[in-house]
Image: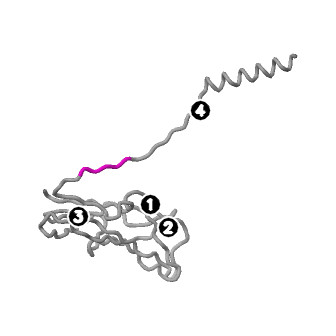
Amino acid sequence: MFKKITAATAFSLACSSAIANPISEGVEFSLFGTIPSPNFVVAPVSPEVLQGVNEVVFNEATGSFVPFITTFEIVSANNFTVTSTSPSKLISGTDEINFDLRFNGMMLPTGTQSTVQSNGSLDKQYFPLQVSYPPAGTTGYAPGDYTGVVSLVFSSTL
C-alpha cells in the first residue's frame, strides 16, 4: 500500500511540476518588403535570387567556379548608379577567393560607383549581373565550404 501512495504522489508531483514549468520554443525569421517608386524600380528577374543562398558551382575539370549570372529588371527614366558595398570575396575559415562583379558588362570594384545609361523612358530595361572567379593558379583553391555576399546599391535622381 505504501508503494502505491508513493507512486501516486510522485505522479502527482510530476504533473504539477510540468504545469508549473511550461516548456516553450521560439522562432525568428526575417521579413522583406518594397514599395517601389513608379519612376525607379529595381528587381531581379528571378526573385529567388534575394530569397536565399545562391549556390555557385565548382567545376572540377577547370578547377574554378562557374560564373553566377542573373538579370535585373530596371525602370528608370534617368541614368542611375550601381555601387558594390561589400567585399567581393568568398570565405572559408581563413581562406578567401576574390571574385569580380560586372553589372551590364562594367566592373564594380567594392565602394566605387558605375553609371548606367538609361534609355530615357519608363520602359523596363534588363541588365545582367555576373559574378566571376579568377583562375585558381597552380596550387588550386583550398578545399572548404565558401560563403560570400553581394551587396549592391542602385541610385537615381527622380
Determine contact: label 3, label 4, CB under 8 Å: no
* Residue at image mark 4: 23
In the image, which residues are magenta?
Answer: 31-35
The local crowd at label 4, few if under 14, some if 14 to 19, many if 20 or more residues have their Cα within 10 Å, is: few
Can you tell which of label 1 and label 3 is closer to the viewer? 3
Q: CA separation, marks 1 and 2? A: 20 Å
Label 1 or label 4, whichever comes before in sequence order: 4
Q: Is residue 11 above or below residue 34?
A: above
Label 4 or label 2, whichever comes before in sequence order: 4
Identify the amino acid type marked 1: Val
Residue 75 as seen in the image, left or right of residue 50: left
* Residue at image mark 2: 95
Q: CA separation, marks 4 and 2? A: 42 Å
Q: CA separation, marks 3 and 4? A: 49 Å
Q: CA separation, marks 1 and 4? A: 32 Å
Placement of the N terminus among the 4 image quadrants: top right
Q: Is residue 51 above or below residue 120?
A: above
Identify the main secondary structure in magenta. loop
Identify the amino acid type marked 4: Ile
Label 1 or label 3, whichever comes before in sequence order: 1
